[in-house]
Image (cartoon, helix red, strand yellow):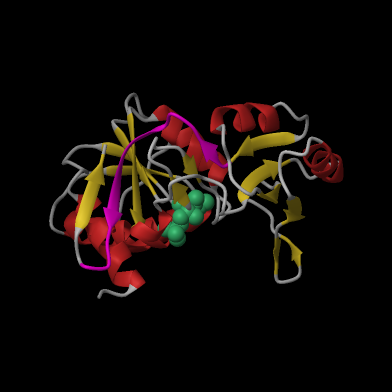
Amino acid sequence: MLSSEEVKKNAGVFAADLVKNGMNFGLGTGSTVYWLIRELGVRVSQGLEIRAVPTSAQTVSLALEAGIPLTDLDQVAQLPIAIDGADEIDPQGQLIKGGGGALLQEKIVAAAAEKMIVIADGSKYVSQLGRFPLPVEVIRFGYKQVMRRLLDAGICRSVKLREKNGTPFITDHQHYILDCQFDHIDDAPAINTFIRNITGVVETGLFVRMASSAIIGHSDGRVETIN
Ligand code: 5RP
């Protein structure tokens, strides 16, 4: 049985093969993407020519440390793929993302890419979304109003302001994150639309009809691609 880190590494290294010479690509955030970055760093040092559009400040520093050249969405005409992690993936390819707090930029990059490829360990593949609290990025001003709207609507069981070291967690774009606990999410597109329509909400961590495929690592060493 492989450790969870080894499983993530297998998925990340497997996905590195999708990044071809000369390609611009979206580079996600998180501990699985970390292994992709490490592997691509090695390949860049061996002559692979690529440019990454990073999805967070954390990924910017990891990519620069690994020697991966960066670019941004305003510089690229085409983004054939974006590779990113996820907190939950269902059989329809719907995702919950934002466990690391980078959901806004991750969604913008995924939307710009022709294909979004998810990398994750098998524990993230679920029959129904909703056990992982749904991150919702909100404007700081008046955020308690948004919390109230979410609770009053009765769509989720509880809503918590995300904190780090006892103070509110601030995203790369200077917003707050509300973590919404559901029992399960039956209709992801409807929930996504409902939450996005609340004034003060910037974006949700529900990625609907965005992922093209998922590369899933398993503890027995297998790496599976689900289309
Ligand atoms: C960050 C994310 C990550 O992709 C997600 O949390 C998965 O991360 P990890 O690979 O560390 O489990 O959405 O905002």
In which quadrant of the rendered image does the C terminus lie?
A: top left
Q: Residue at x 71, y 26 (%)?
A: 197
> Where, by quadrant of the figure, is residue 103 drawn?
top right
Residue 49 x/y as whole percent: 19, 45
Give 183 or 46, whichever is nearer the viewer.
183
Residue 32 x/y as whole percent: 37, 59
Q: Residue at x 28, y 31 (%)?
A: 80
Asked whether residue 85 is drawn in magenta, I would say: no
Residue 39 x/y as whole percent: 24, 60
> Where, by quadrant of the figure, is residue 94 drawn?
top left
In which quadrant of the rendered image does the N terminus lie?
A: bottom left
Does residue 221 appear to the left or right of 155 in the view shown? left
Residue 62 x/y as whole percent: 40, 61
Q: Is residue 44 above or below residue 89?
A: below
Give 171 or 215, whichever is nearer the viewer.
215
Q: What range of the chain is rendered magenta?
A: 205-220
Can you see residue 16?
Answer: yes
Give 119 or 52, whichever is nearer the viewer.
119
